[in-house]
Image (cartoon, rainbow, N blue to C red):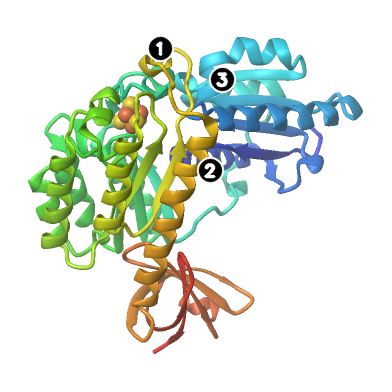
Amino acid sequence: MVGKVLNYFIETIGCQMNIYESNKLGLALSAYGVSKVNVLQEANIVILNTCSVRLQSEQKAFSFLGRAEELKKDNPNIKIIVIGCMAERIGFKIQQRFKSVDLIVGSKDIDNAVLKIVNLCNLYDFSFDKVEDFSNIVRYVTIMRGCDNYCSYCIVPLVRGREIGFNALDILEESSLLIKNGTKEVVLLGQNVNSYRYKNFNFTSLVKSLATINGLERIRFMTNHPKDLSDELIEMMATESKVCSHIHLPMQSASNKVLKAMNRKYSYEHYIGLVKKLRMAVPNIRITTDIIVGFPGETKEDFEETFKAVKEIRFGGLYVFRYSSRPDTKAANMFDNTSLKEKKMRHRLILEESNKISVEIVKSMVGNAQQVLVEKIKNGVIEARTSGGYKVFVTGGSEKDLGRHLNVSIKEAKVNSLFGDIV
Ligand code: SF4
């Protein structure tokens, strides 16, 4: 493909790790003179970064590949590349079903994706002067890969492999480079960052080392596992001013029977104990969570325990999922006793309650001043974020505000967004 104007379109399905990997891939491709386009029809390299965690994610990927295949009928030179968890799990089947797919790179081989794409598309390595400027205020840094927890419903350990903590010195170097290029906030990513280990580093010591980098102003991390959230980490969150006052702590269920069947390795009592400790140590901390409804064996009473917990804990936001069986997981062999109708109802009840609480929480911020970090500016409107992770829109900003901390007086609040004026 040398000599042609090349551009890529990348569709990313799934978690923050996938978003990070797609951005990294895009950055690498730009070194080969390949530009990003936002319209599928304009691309001659089409990349799909897949997720296997939920059935819906896989269905979404198939539908995208159907669209890409149609385009290839008109322009056979288009290259279609599938990467990520689905590529790992059922890459062969994807290629059987979509003959137009040129390359499959599974999540365990993701580090070689660039090389494989370069070979496939016969790309020429331009000078690094041509690297597009992806610099922005908030950047993701993956600190580990895989997971050892084998929650009975989850496909991640099967498609991403065992847990590996990346070299702490590389993480520190990558973050320092980002800061030099204008980043102010890093978000550390891993399936279970709390169990991060690399030689003498654990997660707390890694964050403490990061916090010493000059110019780095905020540190966030996700996702956390309640069984591995240590007192040491909670104390660090309380004392290290650069660490944001937000934690995503998946609860999944408040029924101990269901938690056991999920192989989550903690009880609801343990979970609620963590919530109390976090709130005691970090006043105003925003705790968000994940919930699964309709897990095999979940009775109405089990669900009611979860609903009650959502009401009592008052999360600052949550993701609720209807259980769907994933092949080769332990839960796939369990009897799925809840009808789709009932699952939908439980899903709706949790969502409605959570939205109601979220609105109450954000409305309570109206009239208060919040410190925000400015992430983007578009048509004079500032897009910023509080330490708790709430998006705040502020009018009357200018380019010079990018990357700055501002004090904003909140005048209006919606479910997860706030609107304000600069104080
Ligand atoms: S902790 Fe459980 S849910 Fe999270 S990635 Fe690992 S196995 Fe999956």
Q: Amino acid at mark 3?
A: Ala
Residue placed at 17% from the left, 33% from the top? 266
Q: Which is in the foreground here, disc 3 or disc 1?
A: 1
Depth-wise, is mark 1 or mark 2 nearer the camera?
1
User: Quarter of the image containing the N terminus?
Assistant: top right
Cα distance in 3D space between marks 3 and 1 = 23 Å
Q: Residue at x 43, y 16 (%)?
A: 332
Q: Residues within 10 Å of mark 2 (few under 14, many from 20)?
A: some
Dot label at residue 23: 2
The residue drawn where x is 34% and y is 39% is: 303
Q: Which residue is mark 1?
A: 333
Reading the chain from its start, which is encountered first: label 1 or label 2? 2
Q: Is residue 200 above or below residue 330?
A: below
The image quarter in which residue 203 lies:
top left
Between discs 3 and 2, the one toward the N terminus:
2
Q: Is residue 7 left or right of residue 411?
A: right
- Label 1 neighbourhood size at 10 Å, few (<14), some (14-19), many (20+)? few
**In the rendering, at what x and y percent does residue 31 appear?**
60, 40
Residue 7: where, in percent of width, then height?
73, 40
Query: Which residue is the site of mark 3?
Result: 87
In the picture, measured across the screen, residue 124 lies left or right of residue 149, that is right
Q: Quadrant of ligand 1?
A: top left
